[in-house]
Image (spheres, grey):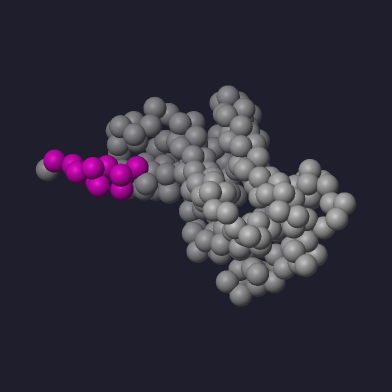
Amino acid sequence: MRRTKEDAEKTRDDILNAAAMLFASQGVARTSLCEIAKSANVTRGAIYWHFKNKTEIFDALHERLHQPVAAMIAEGLEKDHPEPLQQLKDLCVKLFTDLEEDEQRRLALTLFMVKCDYSGDLAPYKEKHDAKKAEKMQNISRYIKKAKTKGKLPEGMNPDILMLTFNCFMKGVLFEYLDNPAAFNFKKNGPKIFDTFFDTLIG
C-alpha cells in the first residue's frame, strides 16, 4: 500500500513523541534509536527515513517546541494593542494554559530546561538553540518597548531591567510547574499568577 503524506507525518510525529518521552525521562545519551523505534511502534528504517540520527531528532523536538511559541509572540506584535503589557500578560496566560493541555510540550520543556546539558553530540546545537531563544526574548522585549512608547510603563521603570525581571519570573514559574505540575491549575489560577507580576505594572 502506498503511503500518503498524512501517514508520513503521523509516523514522524509518533517518532518525535516517543523520543520526547524517552529523552525527558532518561536523557538523550542513554536513549537508543532502537528504544525510540520500539516506543513509537515503527522500524529503525522508518526513523532513518525521517531523521539522519538521534541528534537530528533532538533538534526537531526543539523546533517543534519553539516554532509555535515564536509565531504566537510575533503575531501579537503585529497588532496595535492599546495596552501592550496587558497583551503580554494575556499571551503568558494562554501559553501556560496551552502547556497544561499539551503533554508533548511539557515533555519537550522538561528535556530542554531540566534534562539537557548540551554536552557531547548535542554541543553543536547549543548555539543554534540559544539564538532562537534570544530571538524570542527580543520579540518579547518589543512588547515592553511598545508599552514605554505608549506611556504605559510606570514612571522611572527601566525597560531592560523589567525584561530581565520578567525573564527570571517566567523561568521560575516554568521550573516550579515542571517540577510539580499537579500543584498548578493554569485554567483556574493562571490569571491570578500573572496578576501578581503584572498588576503593579499595568495599574
- Answer left or right for 39 relative to 85: left
Looking at the image, which residue is at 78% across and 46% down?
A: 159
What residue lies at 49% left-to-right and 31% top-to-bottom?
55
Q: Nearer the viewer, residue 119 or 147?
A: 147
Q: Report x, y in % for residue 196.
A: 76, 67
Residue 23 vertical position relative to residue 170 in the rendered view, above or below: above
Image point (85%, 55%), residue name: 155
Asked whether residue 118 appears in the rendered view, the answer is yes
The percent coordinates of residue 102 (x first, y second) are 49, 59
Question: Where does the image place residue 43, in percent across and percent down from the top left?
Answer: 30, 39
For this rendering, which residue is in front, 43 or 63?
63
Percent across and percent down for residue 116 are: 62, 39
Magenta span: predominant SS is helix
Q: Is residue 6 magenta?
A: yes
* The residue positioned farthest toward the left in the image shown: 1
Residue 65 appears in the rendering:
no
Q: Quadrant of the C terminus?
A: bottom right
Pick whichever, 92 or 85, lies toward us.
85
Which residue: 61% across, 75% down? 188
Determine if the magenta segment contains residue 63.
no
> Going by the picture, which residue comes out furthest to the front?
150
202 with respect to 58 (left or right): right
Q: Quadrant of the N terminus?
A: top left
Determine which quarter of the picture holds residue 106: bottom right
Q: Residue at the far right: name it.
A: 156
Work out whether residue 95 or residue 146 is closer to the camera in this orientation and state it: 146
Report the number of numbered marks.
Answer: 0
Looking at the rendering, the stretch of residues picked out in magenta corresponds to 2-12
Q: Name the side, left or right, on which 16 lies relative to 2.
A: right
